[in-house]
Amino acid sequence: MNSGMVVILSGPSGAGKGTILELGIELLKKVGLDTALSVSTTTRTQALTEIDGIHYNFTTAEKFRELLRAGHFAEYNIYGADYYGTPRSNIKSAVESGRILFVEIDLNGMRQIKSLYPEAVTIFVMPPSMHLLRERIMSRKRDSDTPEKIKYRISRAAEEIKCADEYDYIIVNDTLSDAVDDFVSIIKAESRKSIRIKNIIKEVLSV
């Protein structure tokens, strides 16, 4: 069995990383690649439309902190009063089973996982311009969003973009179809690296 691969996808709010990931996975499955999405653990309130174990693993703050002390998470962050974390078991099972595991997290989370798993592939999705990003953020504005919240998202996006050179790859999401093609090409190329498919040598020689 070939070794699995961990792929970290980051990008500012409004960059379109979620859409690229969703469409990209569909195409990767069509070419026979075994993919999976990492399910994060969180302490936030479960929405009515969310399924525990599918969208998130929901838990209490007390239990999360207990798991954190036990080294359960490969990375974690706190947003507001809520904890979010990526279980180490997600990564371990994917690598051992030969699957491609996609982890959608921010810059801080990427740094944490990369320190533990240097072989992880990191991709940053960014908009073609800050002007377009502002338009996208404004178009997604919720009724509860205050001008301060919008300003914060735009400011945070600029700070994240400044650190994009820490990633292995950068995808500029100008035209969605082109961005998805870039994403798929990166994953297909990374999945064929010799370090990940050493078993093919034995398989060919054994025939």
Image (cartoon, rainbow, N blue to C red):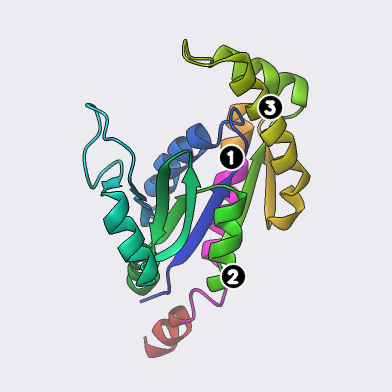
The amino acid sitting under disc 1 is Asp
The amino acid sitting under disc 2 is Ser
Q: Quadrant of the N terminus?
A: bottom left
Left or right: where 11 falls relative to 24: right
Q: At 30% from the left edge and 41% from the top edge, which residue is drawn?
A: 55
Q: Quadrant of the C terminus?
A: bottom left
Q: How many marks?
A: 3
Mark earlier in primary sequence (2, 1): 2
- Horizontal and vertical percent for residue 100? 42, 59
- Mark 1: secondary structure: helix
Are the residues at dot 2 and dot 3 in contact (C-beta closer than 8 Å)?
no
Residue 122 seen in render: yes
Give the answer, above or below, for where 56 lies relative to 122: above
Of the residues tagged 2 and 1, which is closer to the observer? 2
- Horizontal and vertical percent for residue 36? 36, 53
Q: Is residue 27 magenta?
A: no
Which residues fall within the magenta stretch?
Answer: 181-198
Q: Residues within 10 Å of mark 2 (few under 14, many from 20)?
A: few
Give the residue number, with chain letter if any, for mark 3.
Answer: 154
